[in-house]
Image: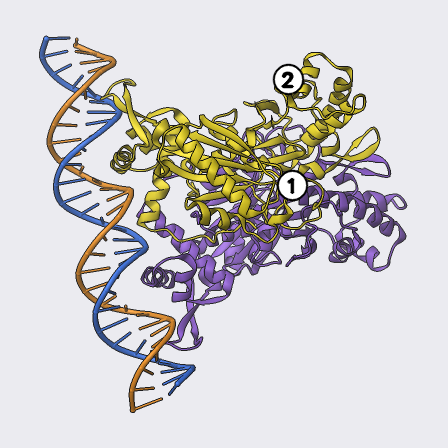
Chain colours: A purple, B yellow, C orange, D blue
Amino acid sequence: MMTISSPKGSNAERSRIINRRAVMGSIHGAGIMGRAEIARNLSLSTQAVSNIIAELLEDGLLFENGTRASGRGLPAVQYAVNPDGGYAFGVEVRPSAIFGSLLDMRGKSVFTERLPLTDARPKAVIEHVIALRDKGLKSVSISEEKLLGAGIVMPGPFGRTGLAGQGSDLPEWDSVDPHKFFEDALEIPVMVSNDANAAAMAERITGVAQGLSSYAYLYFGTGLGLGIVSQGHLVPGAFGNAGEIGHVAVPIDGQMRSLESVLSRLSAQRKLQNDDKQVLDFQSIADLFTAKDSELLEWLDTASIALGHATQIIENLFDPQTIILGGAMPLGVLDYLVENTSLPELTVSNRSARNEPRLKTGTSDRLTATLGAAALILNQTYTPQFVVAH
Amino acid sequence: MMTISSPKGSNAERSRIINRRAVMGSIHGAGIMGRAEIARNLSLSTQAVSNIIAELLEDGLLFENGTRASGRGLPAVQYAVNPDGGYAFGVEVRPSAIFGSLLDMRGKSVFTERLPLTDARPKAVIEHVIALRDKGLKSVSISEEKLLGAGIVMPGPFGRTGLAGQGSDLPEWDSVDPHKFFEDALEIPVMVSNDANAAAMAERITGVAQGLSSYAYLYFGTGLGLGIVSQGHLVPGAFGNAGEIGHVAVPIDGQMRSLESVLSRLSAQRKLQNDDKQVLDFQSIADLFTAKDSELLEWLDTASIALGHATQIIENLFDPQTIILGGAMPLGVLDYLVENTSLPELTVSNRSARNEPRLKTGTSDRLTATLGAAALILNQTYTPQFVVAH
DNA sequence: ATTATTACTCAACTCACTTGAATTATCAAC
DNA sequence: GTTGATAATTCAAGTGAGTTGAGTAATAAT
């Protein structure tokens, strides 16, 4: 389902697109920055950067932010990203509801909304998506032109796989190319991804992964997903289904079980439901954690063992700067996992010289993936899709 | 140890470099190709491609290869990669020996040699490397200018990690940046990588991964490594140590054991040594396999179970087009593993619509990594280090 | 007050790609 | 066979975007 774009050659126009993004990315990463500094950073002439910045100012994507002297010489005029310069629309499609979000240029959420869904067929979904978009635009009084694009999060796996029927997939979409479908309907650039990848990108734009280029993100949705970022780019897999770590088996009490069956919100809910037959929501789990519920602590023990195994696999396969835990799981629970997981010793990540902890928590929110959907678009405007060697 | 190059902006000169590589890559991938066809492929004007091809002809990297008519219109002049246009130098450094190779532009090996090493310190190593280079150049009568670069394979992990002392590392190199060291000494572009990554690239240039963009490569060295290729690029990890899959634990006979301890040449050698206390080499294993040695078949049973687990992990984490098995293990053994491994069902790769098998064998050779080292350089000349969105 | 240093701008230049018209070679239809 | 459509190729002019070098302005150090 994921269209693999064949690489294109470069020309003047495409260079400008790349350089605009590189300039935006530099400023976004540093907060404020001067032209000469950016030019050095990107190995471009100051004149080139000056021209690009003039264009970006014109487009309202940047604004001047005073001057800063560093030692001798004329103090550099600083530029910062204009939060109101553009907005990214994020959509999360689940079988029973659609979530929408709007992020400003700095990744701040300015609108979120949930619409229940009774019909998950493409036609019904797109109507709801458009309704969400219009409501969002109206609620913050911005015009449609300011929309940079739409990020769409849909439950994976994409296409029929050995995991079909395992969870929350949308069978009605089997024969639809979501990317083309949404782009045709919304008429803005669209990126389609799964929840874990989107959440991973959200951390890169506003969260704890700022400044990191290679990291992994363990996403707690209903199940468990993994977003892999290598050199600033998502590793999508050949068919867009990379990161299905929930289905990897690990030994628990001498028995092989899928990670998802012991390390996910659903597994916690199942464990906690043993007593009273009601479905526990996010808040209930948070409350139980605060109350130091013994069943939950038991679950955490097991989950922590599972996380240790997951860490060993992820670290040895990717050698990331860090592994971030986030998603729809109470922060206390995630913190507890990070603190109480005994880290495997036999991995490449067990090194003395580290700037980042091996595990850390990211944002914990039921809307992580929805915001992440929009972050996919922001990431695109800040990350040139290329790297020049040396 | 791996230097992470910060992205640069683009300009006319860098565009030309990118486009030259894209043109070379198109032709290499297709075998022969005409200018207009390449232009369409890269979304460039035919004029631009014409200019680039003229330059590449001048440089001796291409030659004309007849014309081909396809329907109406003037038949297109076809171009092919000139094998003698340039050579890539590959070096594999092991604690006790250095291996050198030269590949022509089409990836054909024109020289290989082994030099024993009694002193693995950088100074001694570089002397041997230079000796290898000079011998190679002399043996095929090519001048130094035709060397495109050198690929260096060194035993990972790079830097001190939790795996230090586990295997074949080179402690003498702990405080040396191999990339800078070799580039200063050889005065040509250098790429440093581990054996698995290099082997994965070799398959992409000449082997069974031609035309694939996202795949995984299980490398049988002494231990077991994994090369991960995503969208034509290696996934190196934050510190160059991605792919250490050998240290991932899997259940064997109800017990967790590292993959390497059951699925590697060393593990086979240990198993087969039980009877007679001699070290078995590559050829001996091949002979035992032909003789259907019962101990070896026992080892294969266990190894096959381990490979099933490895497959489940790799497929769920990367969703590759295929997993290739290769390295210093007799081809019969690898084929046996591919045929007799029962593939896990619960993975995203277990889909009906597949162009590639889930497992297949690549090259089986003791020199796989040495040739792969040179392939790193060829890959660079064929793969522009960028992707323009859409 | 002078000088070194750095940021920035202007104008000229250059590189490499694009565009459009002209040319050539082939296939297909009459 | 002649004619017309089609496609590859080249030539020459045009364009976009980056670079270069000279000149100006503002600051810190001497």
Q: Nearer the viewer, residue B77 or B1?
A: B1
- Judging from the image, what secondary structure is the residue with disc 2 in? helix
Q: Nearer the viewer, residue B290 or A11?
A: B290
Q: Are marks 1 and 2 in contact (CB under 8 Å)?
A: no
> Left or right: A261 with respect to B338?
right
Residue at horizontal 31 percent and vertical 38 percent from the top: B44
Q: CA distance from mark 1 to mark 2?
A: 27 Å
What numbered label is drawn on residue B93?
none
The nearer-to-camera label among 1 and 2 is: 2
What numbered label is drawn on residue A317?
1
Residue at horizontal 78 percent and vertical 43 percent from the top: A306
Task: Name the quarter where the C terminus of chain B is drawn.
Answer: top left
Where's residue B274, x and y in %?
A: 80, 24
Q: Label 1: how many residues lie within 10 Å, few (<14), some (14-19) or many (20+)?
A: many
Residue A286 visible at all: yes
On screen, B34 above or below B384?
A: above
Where's residue B169, x and y in %?
A: 65, 43
- Judging from the image, what secondary structure is the residue with disc 1 in? helix
Residue A97 visible at all: no
The chain holding disc 2 is B
Q: Give the residue number, with chain letter if any, for mark 2.
A: B332
Where's residue A34, x and y in %?
A: 42, 68
Q: Nearer the viewer, residue B386 or A13?
A: B386
On screen, C17 above or below A202?
A: above
Q: Nearer the viewer, residue A228 or B372?
A: B372
